[in-house]
Amino acid sequence: MRHIKKVIIIFTFCFAALSAESQDTVSAKSVEKGAIDLKSGNYKDVLTSFFQLAATDLTGKNKSFEFKSTLFGIKLRADSTLIVDTNFIKQTFYRNLQFEMKLNVDNNIKPQTFTAGIKYALLNRRDKALADFRGKEIGDRIGNYMKNIEQIQVEYLQSESFQNKSSEDKAQAIKELDAAINKFHQDQDLESLPKDFEDFFRNFLKANSYTVLQKGIDSAYKEIETKPLWTVALNSTTNNFNHAIDSVSFETVFLQGGVSDVFEGDVRANLTYKDTDSANDDYRMVFNGKAGLNFNLFKDVKTKKSLLEIKPQFEYNRILKGLVPNEEKERFSANAEVRIRITDKLWIPLTVKYDIKNKNLFGFLNVAWNMDVFKDFLKGD
Amino acid sequence: MLHKCVVARSFQLSNFCIVNKKPGSRKGNRVGGKNKYFMITLKVTVNGGKAPKDILVHIENLKNTHDISYTKPNSFNQDHDLPSGEYVLIVTGMNPNAVGANTEISITGDFSTAPVPKSPVKKATQIFSAAFYFII
């Protein structure tokens, strides 16, 4: 019970620290939330946008609680103006640098080991928040649409029907026009258009289909999602008796999408150095490599959120040094990882591994969800 | 072309011009010399990433030909000295690709009729256009 309290205190401290928002704004919060919601589970595991808190291997003997954040996510808590474009574009380094903390606990939620690490995206071409369509074909189409929608309003302002209105009526007409154009861009609703503006707008739509433009924009963003992402990470873990560092690992991950965002190539390599805890200076070094394809099987049509993903992959494991008796030097397995999105914030990844040589089947259940769930829980919502 | 740029001013990274109506426009030609000028400040703030396209601004003077049009590549804070009169200001742009991304638009100044709709406004649609009516 004491250990459960410790875990709760540690994580409550994390939430409290992150909730200490000196100048936070609704904008910063909503952007943060949106970026988390839209990412595929596979991408989210590699590089988070702001914060991610996860509980993993809940069905196993060794559970863990994990916290990830980019340096930008932390800086944003102290200075909400960083979300403004002129500041945001200068934060590439901080947005590509992620740190992680992981508390491993045993079956009785007793803390065992603590892992800390940093990760940096050497190559990140899939940052849609920095998309720039200037000088591109889709950019020209968007530019024409924007100019035309401005022009149609100017023509309306110069029309007799508008010019003959009283000042009060003009103000009211502009208020209605503004709300109607906003409504149209939200859900293509034309019902709320002011009557004397309706003809102007319908003529505009004949030459400027927003639906067609929207498809072009969606397609341009999907192309960005297929761009390469390459990260390197360094992690260290303490042991459970004197809390000294006894394990260091280096990992690199490369993601590259296909012709659409339906699948992406996923290659990972990990080299781990671990103290054997024996009296001599022996250590153990393990190499692990994985290569597979992550498929987005279902996406929500409206929100574009990934709902179901499957990642078939091959995994190679080799003990480079420190082989223990009766242990295999290398293992080759075929894996399948299925991720199901239960709610906006809750993913359930299920991993199945098949040991090709020994014909053994293993299964692991992980649950990962972002911090808002915990915040709501702590508030008693 | 309806608008013709006649004056280019020194705004870096932007195009800025006063536009005249085409010949035969219903409007008069020039504001009288006795007109008082008032300063209004337009502030546009893009939140959540980079604006994928330039932001368009058009200030329509409803009583004469001295309209203003310009573009800006990102967030800005722009002062305008305008003769007294009745105006509609239109800001058109595109928000960055993040669900919570938005653009906040505010107009401040010495108005005899304050901007309608009330400033500031926050536009969160992918492409947006905001219009304000005011008298100075």
Image (cartoon, helix red, strand yellow):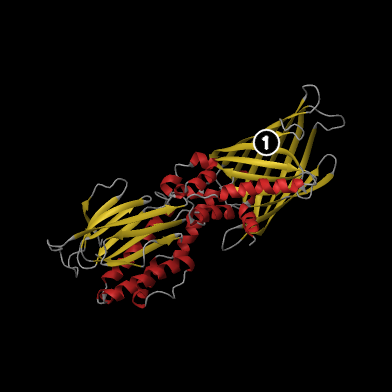
Mark 1 element type: strand
The residue lying furthest to the top in this view is A280
| Residue type at numbered disc 1 | Ala
State whether residue A196 is above or below residue A218.
Answer: below
Tag 1 residue: A269
Count of numbered labels shown in the rendering = 1
Kindly identify the residue that appears in the image at 48 percent across and 61 percent down.
Answer: A214
- The picture quadrant where one finds residue B61 is bottom left
Q: Residue A302 location in percent, x, y?
A: 56, 63
Left or right, A362 with reference to A268: right
Residue B67 vs residue B32, the one in the foreground: B32
The residue lying furthest to the left in this view is B33
Left or right, B96 with reference to A149: right
Q: Residue A118 location in percent, x, y?
A: 60, 37
- The picture quadrant where one finds residue B80 is bottom left
State whether residue A1 is above or below residue B125.
Answer: above
